[in-house]
Amino acid sequence: MEYFVQQLVNGLTLGSIYGLIAIGYTMVYGIIGMVNFAHGDIFMLGGFSALIVYLLLLSVFGGIPIALALFVMIIVAMLMTGLWNWVIEKMAYRPLRGSFRLAPLITAIGMSIALSNFIQVTQGPRNKPIPSMVSSVYEVFGISISLKQIIIVLVTAVLLTIFWYIVNHTPLGRAQRATEQDRKMAALLGIDVDKTISITFVMGAALAAVAGTMYLMYYGVIVFTDGFTPGVKAFTAAVLGGIGSLPGAVLGGIMIGLIESLWSAYFTIDYKDVATFSILAVVLIFKPSGILGRPEVEKV
Amino acid sequence: MANTTSTPVSADSNLTARALREGFYAGLISLGLFVLFVGLKTDQNILNELILVQRWGLLAIFVAVAAVGRFAMVAYIRPFMERQKVTNLVTGLLPDSVATRFFKLPVFIAAAVIGLGLMIFGGTISASISPTAGAYLSLIRGAAVVYTLASVFFYFRAYIVANFSMLAIIALILYPPVILALTGVQGSLKWVDNFGVQILIYVMLAWGLNIVVGLAGLLDLGYVAFYAVGAYSYALLSSYFGLSFWILLPLAGILAAFWGMILGFPVLRLKGDYLAIVTLAFGEIIRLVLINWTEVTKGTFGVSGIPKATLFGIKFDASKDGFAALMGLPMSSAYYKIFLFYLILALALLTAFVSIRLRRMPIGRAWEALREDEIACRSLGINTVTTKLTAFSIGAMFGGFAGSFFAVRQGFVSPESFVFLESAIILAIVVLGGMGSLVGIAVAAAVMIGGTELLREMSLLKQIFGEDFTPELYRMLLFGIAMIVVMVWKPRGFVGSREPTAFLRERKSVSGSFTKEGHG
């Protein structure tokens, strides 16, 4: 039983990271109906910004309180990836808005290849390990919970609350929801659609940057190819939860995290990704709109 | 009147001011983008700790390039493009196009003479000068040859466009002997294998995927799975049962088609992006199984020592009854490569022939109908289940053929060759070429794969940037950027027109934007 709960805790942590990435996929898909394949690499870029900021802080200030360092890392990584995604949207996706559906998908795949190789070229192809930043572990009823896991789950929860508030209770969120429902009508009612879409990209990237920072802190290592697998799994999470739905993305992320850690605990770890993808396939085949998604109504 | 005379001046100064401003912003944004990733580099010191290396000079170059580039774009290039669209007031003609200004007869003659001269005497000249100068010399030779060929294409463009398929097939058949004559037996290896065979494998894969994506409109992101099935069927069946290539080639195709059916069946109900993500998942599952099922597939080590193909029982080895000995030629692996070149050419042409013929058959028309409108298709009584499954399995079959060819060419297969990136590259070739257009896809494969392969040849770059500069490292970066640039520049692909198979009275090309991309 304790072993099981322990796996639940691990899965919840992993799932929080996937959930944060999945929100970026689901928001972009909701607002312009495009699969932003480069989002996983934006996540990786966020992790790398955090890594470089951490090293910079260490070399400039020497010993710095870890809480402050984490805070600075998150803020800089958010700004950094926000800027990147803003530029990417402007240069690679906006010219193709209104073009046929595959065109932005192809530029997104190209952007994903370009981003990961850009990091490979500029930062080198090796693993980048950092010494453990947070190492306290607490024992609660025989389950060991590390401070890292608490931080990850807390940060995710706080960000989700802020985010949920923005989307549901601010003029910006209203503009986003309006653009999502009907772009032309929203434009006629005076919403700056281009700006709203840009902000959506920046917000998604900022959340991915937080996920990247958490990933770096949790595993203590990052490499330029790290965007792909978490990216695909987060997309899987978004689809599983019902693409276009924010709570769905988080739910899907947590489910994927749980599936992964439980599968690794009770079956073979080699096939954990096979399990994730198989469950995705099964869910989509029986409920193509995902768990919380609205069924797509096709008008003739 | 006063107004009209003063406008150009003020417009000019406005333009410069705007260009300066935009250049400044571009520099500022690129500073923000690159400050962490280019300005600082994480590196490991002797103690294996990560340290930061500062590279502010490189960052300054990046920022300067962005700022100057943006300034030139706004101040000169855009106005120039605008002027190209305005007719001359006196003659009523459009200005000369950039191409007519670029390809001039005297320059063409000069380039042809230089290229030919360096081709013949280049070896003797570069032997007597320093390697740096030699590298520049080979660059000049390359540029001259490219310019000459481009001019020939430009002057005969009408003829070439009209007879492209025939000319291309003739050129491909003549390619190995011409290369043999130009570069000798050992020198031809690189050109036939790295360029010829490599490009043709991608042409074949892209034509196979085109059946699924371009004709039936089913977005498949896991096509590489069928390629892997073909490659592993040949590798495993030949090493466990010793069957020959010619038996296993069709078998690999059939097995891949079977897998296409198996994977196609559950996803029949899915559409668009859902279909894409599930096919991606299937592709990853097959790769993960290949990695982890070590008893059979030997995992990440891969299967090695795969037997070579034979030509009517003649082996390509150094033995007494090998190909070289029978033909009275000196032994060289180049002949095997040339044999492989013709083999993949034949396979690719078979793919093209089958997909052209299938398009005109009821099943091909059903595929295109499905792509255009699934609901209408079903209302007209077309069985969408069989239509989708045949598209999946026939596309997969060609992937399987290409896979078994890949295995026989490499002599080694491992799961590393079948990653998602390969699926993405193949899909990118299909879309960049113009979905449904076989010629466009072939051109896209040649440009994208040949272009990145060419980077390996750029020994000159080593001379400029120092010995530790490896152009190969930039291959995929440039590939990604090229995908974006081409897509933004020509969203409908290189060949923007399509030839409908059903027509009234006469066959006409229509714009690619009339065809739908399909939703599932």
Image (cartoon, coloured by chain):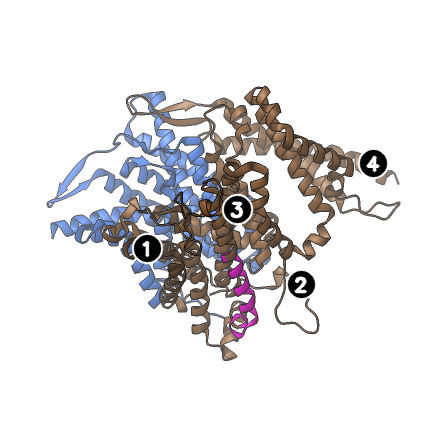
On screen, A221 above or below B345?
A: above
User: Label 4: how many residues lie within 10 Å, few (<14), some (14-19) or many (20+)?
Assistant: few
Q: Secondary structure at mark 1?
A: helix
Chain label for disc 4: B
Residue A121, how many percent across, how many down?
Answer: 44, 33
Q: Are marks 2 and 1 on the same chain?
A: yes
Closer to the chain start, of discs 3 and 4, is: 4
Residue beneath disc 4: B6
Q: Secondary structure at mark 2?
A: loop
On screen, B323 above or below A284?
A: above
Tell me the amino acid under the disc marked 3.
Gly
Question: What's the distance in space between the residues labelled 3 and 4, CA to CA?
Answer: 59 Å
Residue beneath disc 3: B196
Q: Are marks 4 and 2 on the same chain?
A: yes
Residue B16, how many percent across, how many down?
Answer: 70, 32
| Residue in the picture at 38% in, 62% down | B251
Chain label for disc 2: B
Residue A87, how many percent across, how many down?
Answer: 52, 41
Chain label for disc 1: B
Closer to the chain start, of discs 3 and 2, is: 3
Residues at circles 3 and 4 in contact by the CB criterion of under 8 Å = no
Tell me the amino acid under the disc marked 1.
Ser
Q: Nearer the viewer, residue A18 or B217?
A: B217
Q: Main secondary structure of the magenta part?
A: helix
Residue beneath disc 2: B509
Closer to the chain start, of discs 4 and 2, is: 4
Give the numbered dot on residue B444: none
**Chain letter, colour blue:** A
Tell me the amino acid under the disc marked 2.
Ser
Which colour represents chain B?
brown
Q: Which residues are magenta?
A: B347-365
